[in-house]
Image (tube, grey):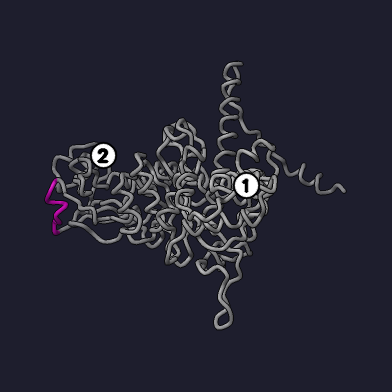
Amino acid sequence: MLDASGVAEALEASLPKGVRARQLSARTLLVGMLVALAEGRPAQLTRVLGSLSALPEADQARLGVMAHWRSGPHALSYRQVEHTARLVSTVLAKASPDGQASAALAGFGAALLEASVPDWARSRSASLAVDWTDMESFACPPVPDVRPSADPEASWGHRRGNGPGQKDELFFGYYLSAATMVNEETGPDVAELVRRATLSSCHVDPVPAFVPALADLASSGVALGDVLADSGYAHRVAEHWALPLRAVGAQLVTDLHPADRGPRGTFAGATCCNGNLYCPATPPTLLGLVPLSRGASAQEAADHDQRTAELAHYKMARVGAEDKDGYCRVACPAVLGKLRCPRRPASMTLSHARPTVLAPPQHQPTCCMQKTLTVPASVNAKTSQKHDYPSAAWRASYARRTAVERSYSTIKDPASNDISRGWCRLMGLSAITVFVTCCLVVRNWRVLDAFEAREADDVRRAAAGLGPRRRKRRRRGLAELVSAGAGP
C-alpha cells in the first residue's frame, strides 16, 4: 500500500541528506507506524520502535531495523526513530504555521488514504458523508502572562459536552474533518471508508478548511456525488461551502440550520424557502414545516410526509439543467399542472384533487406574469440542495450521514485506537496529522476485512439456499426485567 501511494519515495527524496546515511528510512518509519496502530498501540515513537523490533529477523534486515556497521550488527535505536520522525514533520510542515496543513502534508494524507481504498470499493459509490470532531492536544493549554503552550499550533475549540445538561465544552487542540464513503440512494452497500481527512487548528473554521480536500478529490478524476452534512456546514457563508462544492459537481444533502429554515425573502415575487422557490400564494403553515423529531411515531411521520407532499405542489420546478454558470429556469407550478390558479385559466380545468389557489396576489409579480423564470446561482445559494427539505426523500437520503459518525467512533474506541488526549504525545500539526492519517488507514483496513467477511458469508448463505443474515434483536419484557432485578 505504501509503494502504491508513492508517499514514502516522495518523503525520502525531500528529506535532507547528512554526511552519514540514516539507518531508518521514511518508508520503514511509516511501516512501523502502521504496524503499531494495527496492533492497537498508541501513537508513540517508542511503540513504533517496539513494533519494528518485533518483526522477524529477515524483515528487520530488509527494512533496515537491523543494520551491519563496521563494529558489527546494530539495532535501531529510539534516537534514530525520533530523528527521522522530526525530519519528516519538518518537511511536511509550513515555514510559517497558520493552523492549516501545507500542500505537502495535504498531498501526503490524500495519497495514503486513497491507496487504502481498493478499486472495487472505490467504484461502488461517489457519495460522501462529512463531519468534524475534536482532536485534543497532549500539551497543556497556555496560561496568559505565565507560560505559553508546548504545542503552539493548537488552540481552544468547542465540542459536545458529556455532562448532564451540558451543551458543549472547551478543549485545547485541533479539529479533525473526514469524508466517509456512503452508499448511493438506490445502490448496493459499500464499505464505509474514509477518502479524505484534514487536521486544522481550532481557530480555523473547519468547514472552508475542508473544501480544498474535496476539490482535490474531484480534480483527481473522482466524480463527486451526494455530499451529506449536518447543520454545522449549512450555517456558513455560501462561498465557504455550498458554492465551491456545486462548482466541482457535488449534490448537497444538508440539514438546514434553524436560522436558515422557513421563508427567507423573495425573488421575482416567488418565496425563497428551504432552498427552493415557491408560489407567492403558498400557505404559511406549509412553509413553516420543520424536520421530524427523533421520537416521532409512524402516524406523525405519515402526516408530515403528507404535508411536505402538499408543499411540493406549490414549488416552482426546474424545466432544464443548470448551465456552466449555475443559472437555471423554473416554471410556475400552475403552468406545470401541479395546482389550480385563477391567474392560469388552463389550470382551472384540472382535477380538484390538486390544491387550489383561493387568494392570488392582487398585484401580479413577475413570477405570475411569466411562465418561466431564470434563476441565478446567487438565489438560495446556501440552502439549495438535492431534495426538497424536509421531505421524506430528503430524510431517507440524509439518514446515510451517520456513516461518518461511525468512522469517528471506530477511532475513538478504547478497545483499539482511541485518539483521545494522551494517544499521541507529539506536538505540532504535521506530526499529529501523520499519525492520524495512519490511524485512519488502519481503520479502513479493519472495515474492509469486516465488509469482505460479510459479503463472503452472504454468498455462502445464498449458495446454501438461505436468506441474508439478520440481526437478532432480543426483546425483554417488563416481567423479565423485574425478575432480573430481584436476583442477587
Residue 22 lies, with reference to residue 143, above or below; the image says above
Residue type marked 2 = His
Instruction: Work out which residue is located at the far right of the displayed protein and give it.
Output: 488
Residue identifier under label 2:
352
Please tell me which residue lies in front, 113 or 369: 113
Residue 42 lies, with reference to residue 143, above or below; the image says above
Instruction: Work out which residue is located at the far front of the displayed protein and give it.
Output: 70
Q: Which residues are magenta?
A: 363-371
Image coordinates for residue 303, horizontal then vertical, percent: 43, 45
Which residue: 35% across, 49% down?
215
The magenta stretch spans residue 368:
yes
Image coordinates for residue 65, horizontal then vertical, percent: 64, 45
Instruction: Work out which residue is located at the far top of the displayed protein and give it.
Output: 464
Please tell me which residue lies in front, 278 or 421: 421
Label 2 sits on a secondary structure element that is: loop
Which residue: 48% across, 57% down?
199
Residue type marked 1 = Leu
Label 1 sits on a secondary structure element that is: helix
Using residue 488 as the reference point, say whether residue 345 is left or right of it.
left
Instruction: Work out which residue is located at the far bottom of the displayed protein and give it.
Output: 145
Residue identifier under label 1:
37
Residue 265 lies, with reference to residue 454, above or below; the image says below
The numbered dot on residue 157 is none
Marks 2 and 1 sit apart, C-alpha to C-alpha, by 65 Å
Using residue 350 as the reference point, say whether residue 72 is left or right of it.
right
Image coordinates for residue 103, horizontal then vertical, percent: 40, 55
For the question of whether residue 133 can be seen, the reply is: no
Q: Quadrant of residue 427?
A: bottom right
Which residue: 63% across, 54% down?
45
For the question of whether residue 188 can be seen, the reply is: yes
Using residue 453 as the reference point, say whether residue 227 is left or right of it.
left
